Amino acid sequence: MRLLLTSAGVKNPSIRDALADLLGRPIAGSSALCIPTAQYGHPMCGPASAWRFITGQTPLPMCDLGWKSLGVLELTALPSIGEERWVPWVREADVLLVAGGDAMYLCHWMRQSGLADLLPSLQDTVWVGLSAGSMVMTPRIGDDFVEWTSPNGGDSTLGVVDFSIFPHLGHMPDNTMAAAKRWAAEIAGPAYAIDDQTAIKVADGTVEVVSEGHWKLFPS
């Protein structure tokens, strides 16, 4: 897949241009599915925040960018309806817009639903993650970000990319550079701390930081 891993959505023109480049077509000509699942696993989120994400009623631009079409893909529903129904929906979408919330909960349902197994075949699909929706694609999120405990425990996520992400740098009281440095030392692998004006673009094996803000790479 082609990935746009953001801290807070498509917050500025640079990130929007990166999205258009990954799509290879205008946003207005692209079909999107939004995935709100991570919202339900985080203690600060719930039905109201999921609705705000889906309807674009948040300051985190994702679903309100002017897509040709927009649908909702709720991962917890997929095991009960069968792959013959939902896999075509995913394959027909140009982009998956993945909400923030709890990365471990999202990871669990990506595996349970079968979406995680489908990812390697989605070569023409763009994944746009917001916070937890970005972190789920990394190898680990770190104990600091574990709210919902998976049946297997730990902090391991999907490992689609080989680096970890510390989001919302400087935008939350606890998300300081000093905290990011401590977190990165525990991760023991390459890791980026990114603020809400920053995204990481991944295409054809190339990793590019797209930023109108602040970020830092912590090498392994």
Image (tube, rainbow, N blue to C red):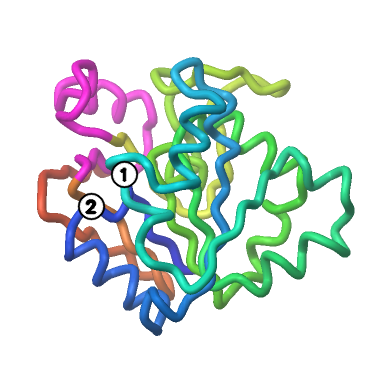
Secondary structure beneath dot 1 equals loop
Q: Secondary structure at mark 2?
A: loop
* Residue located 39% across and 18% down the image: 144
Reading the chain from its start, which is encountered first: label 1 or label 2?
Answer: 2
Q: Number of marks in the image?
A: 2
For label 1, the residue is: 60
User: Residue at 53% of width from left, 69% of height from top?
Assistant: 69
Q: Is residue 55 left or right of residue 21?
A: right
Q: Quick check: can you spot residue 220?
A: no
Residue depicted at 68% across the width and 71% down the height: 91
Tell me where residue 4 sits by quadrant: bottom left
Does residue 175 belong to the magenta stretch?
A: yes
Q: Position of residue 112 (x, y in %)?
A: 77, 40
Tag 2: amino acid:
Lys
Residue 201 percent coordinates (x, y): 33, 63
Q: Position of residue 8 (x, y in %)?
A: 30, 43
Camera-nearest residue between 117 and 28: 28
Q: Residue furthest left?
A: 213
Q: Is residue 178 magenta?
A: yes
Q: Callout 1: few (<14), some (14-19), or many (20+) C-alpha neighbours within 10 Å? A: some
**Rendered position, 61 above or below 189:** below
Q: Label 2 belongs to which residue? A: 11
Q: Which residues are magenta?
A: 168-196
1 and 2 marks in contact (CB < 8 Å): yes
